[in-house]
Image (spheres, helix red, strand yellow):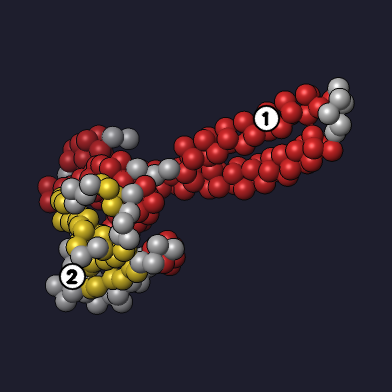
Amino acid sequence: MPDFAILALFTSLGALPVAALAILALRLRRLRAMQAEAVRQAAAEAREQFGRDVHDLVSSRLWLATLRSELAYRLAEEDNPLRPALADVVQAIRQAAADIRNVTRSFQDVSLPSELANARAVLRAYGTDCKIEVTDAELSDEIGATLAIMVREAVTNVVRHSRATLCVIEIALRAGTVTLTVANDGVDPSAPSGAGSGLDNLRTRAAALDGVVGTVLDPDGWFRLVAEIPSRGNIRR
């Protein structure tokens, strides 16, 4: 049933005052935003997992098939009528391996601009203002993909674990280090820092690039996720 229909029903019954109706509408809006984000997150994770599974399973077998067919080609005598056919087989397998790499790459690639746009849309649907500040430097594909996943995870945590009115996402390049900061003002200051935020995956991804991820919980309720990754020449201007 649409929100306006629910509100109209309660109003006609005189069961709830206007303030309570407004609260109910806000909660419904936030619930739907959380559901939409959960679906988007699950779809993105499924795409990435599918890409990894296909690449790991098929590529390894194609690699083995390439080695065996190349061996058969080399062992065949120059005048063996099967030699041209074996050469075609080797070329076909190599092309298939290249096609698999291209297909799985399209499933695994993550776009930082797209994730930032999604973050803004999801947060606004949730009723949270979103401010984004991004460095003008062009990030490498590896760093950009890692930051995109971090933004996705951080925004998911904002939606699930806070009642933020403002979320600030900043990506900056300082002294050879790319820094991502995702801050929101809706965390209970009494909650343990990092509780329920599922940061292990992000720390692992950052560590793969010699980076680190940490969190800060201010007494005024501002929660900050901060990731720092060395640029190491991986910035294109």
| Residue that label 1 marks | 91
- Is 195 in front, or is 139? 139
- Say whether residue 32 is visible: no
Q: Secondary structure at mark 1?
A: helix
Which amino acid type is shown beneath numbered disc 2? Gly
What separation in Å lies between label 2 and label 1 (alpha carbons)?
Answer: 61 Å
Say which label, 2 or 1, has the lower sequence index. 1
Which amino acid type is shown beneath numbered disc 1? Gln
Left or right? Give the position of 228 relative to 124. Answer: right
Left or right? Give the position of 48 relative to 226. Answer: right
Left or right? Give the position of 105 relative to 98. Answer: left
Residue for point 64% across, 34% down:
94
Q: Position of residue 10 (x, y in %)?
A: 22, 42
Residue for point 43% across, 43% down:
109
Is 102 placed above or below 143 here? above
| Residue that label 2 marks | 221
- Crowding near the residue tagged with mark 2, few <14, some 14–19, many ≥20 C-alpha atoms within 10 Å: some
Q: Position of residue 96 (x, y in %)?
A: 63, 32
Residue for point 30% across, 41% down:
114
Looking at the rendered structure, which numbered label has been put on residue 5? none
Disc 2 versus disc 1: nearer the observer: 1
Residue projecting furthest to the front: 78
Left or right? Give the position of 167 relative to 229. Answer: left
Residue for point 86% across, 31% down:
77
Q: Position of residue 201 (x, y in %)?
A: 44, 63
Find residue 191 and report its image quarter: bottom left
